[in-house]
Amino acid sequence: MKTKISFLITLFCWSLLFSAKSQEKEIPMLDNPMSVQYLKKNLRKSQPRLVFNSAIEKNLKKKLKTDALIQNMYKAIKLNADEVYKKPLLERKLEGKRMLGVSREMLWRINMLGFVYRMEKDAKVLQRINDEVVAVCNFEDWNPSHFLDVAEMAMAVAFALDWTAGKLPKSTIKLAKNALIEKGIKPSWPESGKNPGWAYGTNNWNQVCNGGMIAASIAIAEVDPELASKTIWRALDGLPHSLAEYGPDGVYPEGSTYWSYGTRFSVVTATMLESAFGHDFGHLKYPSFVESAVFRSLMNTPSGWYFNFADCGDKRGESGDLALAWFATKTGNKTFFEKERFLMPAEEMGKLSRLAGAGMVWLSQYEEKGEIKVPTAWKGEGSNPVVVFAGGENDPHNYYFGGKGGRGMVNHGNMDGGSFIFELNGVRWVIDPGNQNYHTLEQAGFDLWGRCQDCDRWTLLTKNNYGHSTITINDELHKTEGLVTLSGFKDGDIPEATFDMSATLGDLVSSASRKFVKESPTSIVIEDNIEVSEKTKLITWQLMTTAEVEIIDGGAILKQDGKVLKLENLSHPDFDISIVSLYPAPLKIDRQIEGLKRLEIRIPVWTLNDDKTKIKVRLSGN
């Protein structure tokens, strides 16, 4: 009784502390009735209860008999599961400071094997799951210094326990539950008494780590209900700090591939809560969360690349988007359900998502209730605002323009405010240099994660403004704290968007704005209005491309893949375009992109007639 009273007092103190935090940030909260009493009363008693439960599984098995898409995806999962048997059991090996590769491999293995076991109850599969669980639970730890490693491993072990529903040897069950407590949940509660940064953070760590701790807590709830309930309570209280980042329009500030990472864990968390407690505590209704599916859809360009701003990968995989499928299931919108990709030959899908087993639930629950197409002119505001102009379905030109604001201080952000990409006729003419391997940089002793104005991160071409299609003043870096905001937007047949760039250029200008106008189905106009200050010496207009470039009077001709794009310097035709080769890139540790070059229009301030200038450039194709 004394322990229970002590726990309730502690919980009350946490509630006051974290409620104060939430009120300070004024963000919507999830429902959070969690307590020991609530847990004991409402947690489903029978297994499975993580993602699957008896009703969900009954529906899935029914679909497996009749639905060609479910049958095809199951075939792909079985092919993946077969590959697990060819691999040795996992060992605790770090890559630099991370064990994340091992944890992710374990989550993939359990999703493949675990799903097959749920469908077939094969003793061979059960044995391999047992061997995998014993191996990782005997690790000395799950690398708590990089808690993503712990979170993904904890979710994997929790799934293994739950999806085998008591059929593992008692010794393995005891070992696994002890590991979840000692190597998973307890390290999430620092001895200092303070919460780890990820618990109330604003980035993907919050979604992944809290999701992993919820899975672990549900798996050990009967063993230690107090630890489980306080951990779930903290997760439900902390998760809104990451969910709020989708606001107000659904943009994920860290870019499309990090949307996939963070959102996959959010939707699997929502699914776990539904299967275990009967509802998701407010995930689906959270402001702008569903809208983020529009953002994700629009980040896929006609060429097969992403609009790859921030620390984003270049191209998407071949198979269907399972996280989007969750949104399709919840809304009935076929736009989010990539049917053709889920029906591609199973042999061609390769290695599936490490949450594909869980994702089968969303696929099996999908019922089409209509189609709401993504817009062809769209804006998403927030901490990293984005605009997209697209050609839409059956566009013969495969038109795509993506422009952005933001600042370097955004999670995984770059000095790319005012930058853009442009595709036409299947060619990406204007590129974003994208991301590069973290471990390689860290191994070289490079500080990738500091974001101060003079931090190492901004020496990289992929991170600084010299590697992006934007404006640079006096050849200086953008201000990492200066937020480029979306100040105007108009849709319609000739959509346009304007960004205020003043803050990122700082006192090097008096003011600056950049307008993008889709002038025609085959062109984009970029118009910069700059009011100089006494510090302004040189204005540089930049465009990043891998195309071949021929300089002509008043502009340039770009050639790539047998196609042609014309660059017209409408405002300053007497200023020649300069070509700066960036292959090889300036630093050895820079990402090396074959054929990369920066086109420049350099305007010395002494050539201006007054303190204002307009730079106007048109890009147009056939």
Image (cartoon, rainbow, N blue to C red):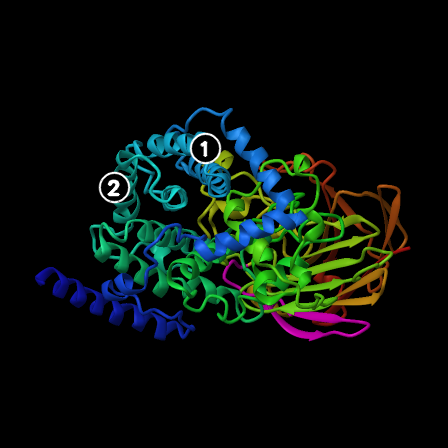
As drawn, is 363 to the left or to the right of 242? right
Whether residue 462 can be seen here: yes
Q: Is residue 485 magenta?
A: yes
Find residue 213 and report its horizontal and vertical position in percent.
Answer: 35, 52
Find residue 267 and report its horizontal and vertical position in percent.
Answer: 49, 57
In the figure, 75 relative to 565: above or below? above
As drawn, is 423 to the left or to the right of 593? right
In the figure, 477 relative to 283: above or below? above
Find residue 142 and report its horizontal and vertical position in percent.
Answer: 33, 38
As drawn, is 130 to the left or to the right of 337? left
Foreground tag (1 vs 2): 1
Residue in view at x 29 percent, y 57 percent: 231
Q: How many marks?
A: 2
In-front residue for pair 314/533: 314
The kind of residue tagged 2 is Asn
| Label placed on residue 178 | 2
Residue in view at x 68 percent, y 38 percent: 593
SS for tag 1?
helix
Residue in view at x 26 percent, y 65 percent: 35
Q: Quadrant of residue 530?
A: bottom right
Q: Is residue 564 magenta?
A: no
| Label placed on residue 344 | none
In the figure, 309 relative to 488: above or below? above
In-front residue for pair 133/122: 122
The kind of residue tagged 1 is Val
Stretch in magenta: 479-502
Find residue 70 and report its horizontal and vertical position in percent.
Answer: 62, 48
Residue at the spot of label 1:
125
As drawn, is 251 to the left or to the right of 583? left
